[in-house]
Amino acid sequence: MNDTKLETINYSLYYGKFRALKDISIKIPENKVTALIGPSGCGKSTFLRSFNRMNDLITGVRTEGRVLIDGEDIFKIDPVALRQNVGMVFQKPNPFPKSIFDNVAYGPRVTGLNDRQKLEEIVERSLRSAALWDEVKDNLGKSGLDLSGGQQQRLCIARALAVEPTVILMDEPAASLDPIATLKIEDLIHELSANYTIVIVTHNMQQAGRVSDFTAFIYTDETRTGQLVEFDKTKTIFTNPRDQRTEDYITGRFG
Amino acid sequence: MSVRMIADKTVKIVLFTSAIISIIVVLAIGFFIFRESIEAWTKLGVGEILFGAVWRPGQDQYGILAMIIGSVSVTFGAILLGVPLALGCAIFLAEIAPAGVQAVVRPAVQLLAGIPSVVYGLFGMVILVPLVRNLNVPGNSGYGLLAASIVLAVMILPTIASIAEDAIRAVPENYRHGSLALGATKWQTITKVVLPAGKSGILAGVILGVGRALGETMAMIMVIGNSVIMPKPLSGNPLTYYLSQARTLTGNIAVEINYATGVHESALFATGVVLFGLIMIVNASARWIIRGQKFVEKANEEQVC
Amino acid sequence: MLEERLSEIAFFHKAQAQSLKREHLRQKIWLGLMWLVGLITVSILILVVGYVLVQGGKAISWEFLATSPKGGISGEGGISTTIATTFYLVGLTLLIATPLGVGAAVFLIEYAGEQSISSKFLRVVIGVANFAVEILAGIPSIIFGLFGYALFVSTLNFGFSLLSAALAGACLVLPTIIRTTEEALLAVPDDYRRGSLALGATKWQTLYRIVLPAGLPGIITGVILSVGRVISETAIFYVTLGGSYHLPNSIMDGGRTLALHLYYLAMDTRAFDKAMGTGAVLVVMIILINLLIDLVSRKLTAGVRKVR
């Protein structure tokens, strides 16, 4: 099998007294796309945010167990440094109210890079990688908010790539997009997987089937505590799931 | 038509009348102040009033340039001292302070806004003026632009801080998350994303602070010295400009209106017209900026949908 | 090519690592500064309020509160008549401003969306009225004073009197009352109105029995805020109220509020100790008013929560 990039060991997460995730142990392979699927409210987005410690921003969140990146405990890494290594794309495109150029250059500038020529290189490369360059190369001064929803989301991906992360977390990146924009994002995810470890949360079974190499099914019952039911190659999960609940979910019997 | 319906109609008319009272008051204020000032404008000339450097009612000289400069100088000083403090306070309250600390600082800011201006003036006279007097510069009485600027800075702090805090809070949370997820520190997120995104509202707060500063009357009279002179440095050091006494437009009106008659009284109303005009311009620009901001926010919302 | 890219990335990661320390230090310094600013703000308040209360407290005695000012060069006597005058003026001003302000707000909110033949005309009036309220809110008090002086004191010949001062003061607090009432009315759920109208109540009955009671805490907040503004206000009354320290016998008499009295003590007689005493009384009043507003608005939010 592949090298493990991200790993959780008996990982649990609490909002105050409420346990949102329970004893999740998973090994996410490097330079592959891993999809997190499951019914809404099962905690898959919360789980995703565990990898770049965005849950730290919510007061009252407490965790148990370990989360490792390249074998290193992420709670021992400076969260700022961690987030430079683990990029994130949000459900709703959230470009800054700045120009396209400044959006992409934001991350490098934050790390102190101000050389205009270098920034131009990075911006071009990132926008190319995000398959947005051809559409915006003549309008880099335009506000990121003036782009269409799908373009905004690719801008956000470019913005994440500019920081040179090794992991990209995507929280339902196509949820607010139309079908054509969704397809473009899916193609992009596929291309990026050659060089990046991608973890994607999605509601859409077909999407998980199309873009991911591996799939993790997270399930919750009335307790609303999320648990990992099954994790395997996407093909296996979709054609030959071991657990009845996985099969029920995939065949649409609930969800 | 039933009695109920008639009552309903009557009430509507009564309420309508109350609603237009504001319009009537605004028009009446403009009308009366302008009417009373006509004598001064026609007898003395617009240029003579606006740009005349000498205000000497005994000799029928009514130039208010010194007062315009006094008002502008003290406002500038107050902005210079008050804005950094107010913005810091807004950032602190909106982004940094834990809830428990907010619960102490926010009421403190509110209370600062409620303290009567004469109390600030008195505090200035008793504490600040003697302190300023300690600066060893010939001709320094303690009363003057510096003491007035400090008092005014404290008085406009709550206005600016509360509007700026609202503006900062109105910045969507996903901008912050976007920045933090890119590996920016909290402070970088504040300075590079949050403040630029909220800048219109913050600027509007500062401008409204300017409006308040220009309009403040009693506290200014109490600490600025009220000499009708063009403020100028007391020594070779240009900073001693702020030790100079001065008089504000507002102070000019309040100090003299109760005994003025004839052209003198009319010239005071002309001072009022100038003050009114200045503040209208200032407030209108704040409105204009906020309008622009609302428009942008709306545009964003629509795009997302 | 790949080699080059890899070395570039390595270089970039190194730069990130280096900037990290610097940025954390910078953040520490700036966040520290922001805490300092918060501390300074609270300190200013404590300094001003504390000084006035402590120094003023020395001048305050039962005698100070209960005897009237005697005039004279050292500001002899107490402040009893000025306290009374302050209350008279607050009462009269709010008597004028509250019905007008609440009425205006009710019209601006409740009739704004109404469909009727004259609705286009009404819409224009409502727009202009809202604009006028905003202008009023920005006018400095000395301009209200000048206006009151020109119209009420001189033209209408009310002289320097409680009436002139209250009319001018009403213009000052009108926007406060209108805005807070508007907010309170907007917070009343539309279901209440529909429910009442559906039962056959007229608009006025709906307003009077349902909407206004629901918005009452907000309206009260506006009124209390206005009380504070009248107590604090000096410039307007300096040019419309005369300044006599005797107790006014009618609304056509002049007088002197606490704030005005403080000003005269400080500026004319230089009786700073008594001025401080007066200041302390003022500050205590303002603190009480702030507490009261806090209490009412807490009730208000509790009410809203119940509604939801």
Image (cartoon, coloured by chain):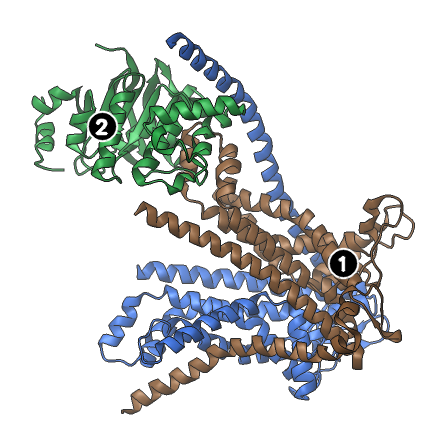
Chain colours: A green, B brown, C blue
Instruction: Report x, y in % for residue A164.
Output: 40, 20
Residue A225 visible in the displayed image: no
- The residue at the point 57 percent across, 58 percent down is B285
Q: Which residue is mark 1?
A: B69
Is B110 rendered above or below residue A79?
below
Amino acid type at circle 2 is Leu
Quadrant in which the C terminus of chain C appears: bottom left
Is A39 rendered above or below residue B58?
above
Amino acid type at circle 1 is Ile
Mark 2: which secondary structure?
Answer: strand
Identify the disc placed on residue B119.
Answer: none
Instruction: Report x, y in % for residue B304.
Output: 32, 45
Q: Which residue is mark 2?
A: A36
Instruction: Report x, y in % for residue C141.
Output: 65, 69
- The residue at the point 7 percent across, 32 percent down is A251
Mark 1: which secondary structure?
Answer: helix
Q: Which numbered disc, 1 or 2, marks the residue closer to the eye?
A: 1
Exactly how many numbered labels are in the figure? 2
